Image (cartoon, grey):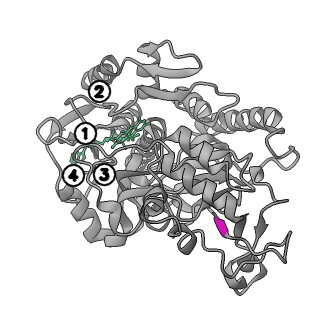
Amino acid sequence: MEPVNIIGAGLAGSEAAWQAARSGVPVILHEMRPAVGTFAHKTGDCAEMVCSNSFRSDDDVMNAVGQLHWEMRAADGLIMAMADRHRLPAGGALAVDRDAFSQAVTEALRAEPLIEIREGEIGDLPIEGNWIVATGPLTSDRLADSIRSLTGTEALAFFDAIAPIVHAETIDMSVAWEQSRYDKGETEAERRAYINCPMNRDEYEAFIDALLAADKTEFREGETAGYFDGCLPIEVMAERGRETLRHGPMKPVGLTNAHKPNEKAYAVVQLRRDNALGTLYNIVGFQTKMKYGAQTEVFRMIPGLQNASFARLGGIHRNSFLNSPTLLDDRMRLRKRPNLRFAGQVTGVEGYVESAAMGLLAGRMAAAQVRGDDLGPPPFTTAMGALVNHITGGAEAKTFQPMNVNFGLFPPLEEMRGGRKGRKDRYPAYTQRAKDDFRAWLATQ
Ligand SMILES: Cc1cc2nc3c(=O)[nH]c(=O)nc-3n(C[C@H](O)[C@H](O)[C@H](O)COP(=O)(O)OP(=O)(O)OC[C@H]3O[C@@H](n4cnc5c(N)ncnc54)[C@H](O)[C@@H]3O)c2cc1C
């Protein structure tokens, strides 16, 4: 039987190898460490956790990442099984003993007769065979060059520059209004494509003070600040001059406050739709290195966002990721070269759990293909399905940035109440629907 070849034994590649092998298909897992290292990895173990030791919330009723845990356990996931085995006390979160966890994943993969682990860097994208590329945010330079020469230089980013993303239902529309600058656009929807939050002079000055005072994260050694070319963090813009933002992403021109048409705003923060469902909006031009706690405080100073709930906060990191909405089909294959499937953080998901989940899916899909079957993704009412649907089609391709799993990616339940108050009913309904639909998807295999 033809093997599935996997490049990268990180969180995604390890899970993909496990899933393919457990369904009876041979696997060759290629890993460059320890011979070739990265600035973040310290060992030669599979599934090394490079920073925190947390898989985040384990609440599968009220939390989307907890629901993703549930789905991965239901699908016999290796990463979740080893995380459960090496769990540390952490309240509602799933934290693990990182060394014991990675060693256990490595041992399980080595003990699986259908998996062969081969050490060494893969420098070029293979032309033939059934491959999964799961090389993560720190994909080696040689392979990154090879990916770029196949997909085009714009299609593989080296840095993420993530502006915060807000749940649309938590924006106060009695303060904010919908309008594109100078009412540009052919259709009514285009003319109303942005949500605008106005600031008067005092609010602007207080906002700049808060930005300058906020705690920031420093770059790690080896994680060079190459982002400076095109996407300055807002706090760096503010450091260059108090007026810089007012002449940049916060310029108030071409906009009329729908609630106070005679009052000219001193500055305007704009939010742009981030997914086809219209449930998520990103704050335009607000990439930042502020610490998460500081971000929530500072961004809630923006009129209209005082009660905002964030699907994800901003950041700038070294991160290789594809423009998946344009490059991948819904089976996670490169449209241009369908023998290559991508999985993990390189597809534009963010985080250990999300990366492992995409590995789980890619491993099952690749194995099905070897057996002559076709396996589609789970329905997008499930956490795994919502995530893969987002990266392969639901996300806005032009502004695509890595995404965590969150309820904003789930199709809304028509009959449920929106807003923050409705969450205690809405979230359990989402996760119940997800469990039912995930079980049904598993039953088809
Ligand atoms: C500095 C840093 C801190 C982070 N902190 C967190 C955090 O706290 N929490 C969190 O959830 N996520 C964090 N992340 C994101 C984290 O990297 C991912 O969540 C997760 O590791 C991604 O899994 P992956 O399998 O896609 O990539 P990885 O786990 O990085 O695995 C990719 C593997 O591919 C190998 N590889 C790369 N190129 C080649 C090649 N050419 N040939 C062979 N092998 C290759 C690498 O050695 C690596 O083992 C962080 C990332 C970075 C860079």
- Find out whether the residues at labels 2 and 1 contact each other: C-beta distance under 8 Å: yes
- Whether label 4 lies within 8 Å of ligand 1 gets the answer yes
Q: Which residue is mark 2?
A: 109
Percent x, y for residue 275? 63, 60
Quadrant where the N terminus sits is top left
Residue 355, above or below 271 = above
Residue 384, above or below 115 = below
Q: Which residue is mark 4?
A: 140
Q: Amino acid at mark 3?
A: Trp
- Cα separation between marks 4 and 3: 17 Å
- Cα separation between marks 4 and 1: 16 Å
Mark 2 Cα-neighbour bin, 10 Å: few <14, some 14–19, many ≥20: many
Q: Nearer the viewer, mark 4 or mark 2?
A: 4
Q: Earlier in the sequence, mark 3 or mark 2?
A: 2
Q: Amino acid at mark 2?
A: Leu
Residue at figure coordinates x 48%, y 29% from the top left: 55
Q: Which residues are magenta?
A: 267-271
Residue 337 visible within the image: no
Residue at figure coordinates x 75%, y 49% from the top left: 170
99 drawn magenta: no
The answer to which of 373 and 256 lies nearer the viewer is: 256
Q: Quadrant of residue 249?
A: bottom right
- Find out whether the residues at labels 4 and 3 contact each other: C-beta distance under 8 Å: no
- Cα separation between marks 3 and 2: 18 Å
- Cα separation between marks 4 and 2: 23 Å
Q: Earlier in the sequence, mark 3 or mark 1?
A: 1
53 left or right, relative to 308? left
Q: Earlier in the sequence, mark 4 or mark 2?
A: 2
Q: Which residue is mark 3?
A: 131
Quadrant where the C terminus sits is top right
Instruction: Report the disc number at residue 29.
Output: 1
